[in-house]
Amino acid sequence: MTAEETVQQELEKKFPALAGKVRVQRARRIFVDVEYQDFRPLLEFAIGLLKFPYLCVITGLDEGDQLGIIYHMSGESGIILSIKTRVPMSDPKVKTVTDLFPSAEIYEREMVDLLGAKVEGLQAAFRYPLTDDWPTDQFPLRKSWKTPDVPKGEIKHV
């Protein structure tokens, strides 16, 4: 049995609802789809018992009526574990994971600014990556976002 298959088996054993939702895509790549209410326990299990203590990046996706969020994690084995969950776009609330991964702050700020996620527990601070004067209700990575009409000659170049 490969290391990837062992991780898959451990995940499905601990979380029976994941049967068929854990995919070994190729060597060193595992993808998991999980309901948001089961996300935190799975994340903690992956960090602790499966030894995936490093957060590589968080990816946010506009999936129409849902916001998809993928947490890419790694460990000493060189395997990347990507855990995907979804929340409704109408109320895209997630809890911060900065208590587990302090480095998650910058990625969570990107989700707030670019996709309009509401990250509960994220400390109030600077905006990133958009400027402080960017309209708070404009999320440029949402499929529904349209570039504001700006009359010719009024575009500011920095």
Image (tube, rainbow, N blue to C red):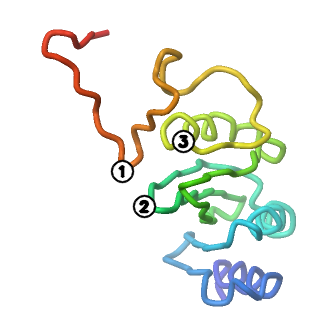
Give the spatial CA distance, label 2 vs label 1: 7 Å
Corner quadrant of residue 145: top left
Between residues 144 and 55, which one lies in front from this camera angle?
144
- Amino acid type for the residue under numbered disc 1: Lys
| Residue at 49%, 76% in the rendered image | 26
- Label 1: which secondary element: loop
What type is the residue that disc 3 sits on? Gly
Mark toward the start of the polypeptide (3 vs 2): 2
Proximity of marks 1 and 3: CB atoms separated by less than 8 Å: no
Question: Neighbour class for label 3 at 10 Å: few (<14), some, many (≥20)?
Answer: many
- Residue that label 3 marks: 116
Residue 64: give its label.
2
Q: In the drawing, what numbered circle is on residue 76?
A: none
Task: List x then y, in percent, for residue 38.
Answer: 77, 70
Q: Is residue 59 above or below residue 156?
A: below
The numbered dot on residue 143 is 1
Label 2 or label 1, whichever comes before in sequence order: 2
Asked whether disc 2 touches disc 1, contact meaning CB atoms under 8 Å apart, the reply is yes
Front residue of this view, candidates 8 and 67:
67
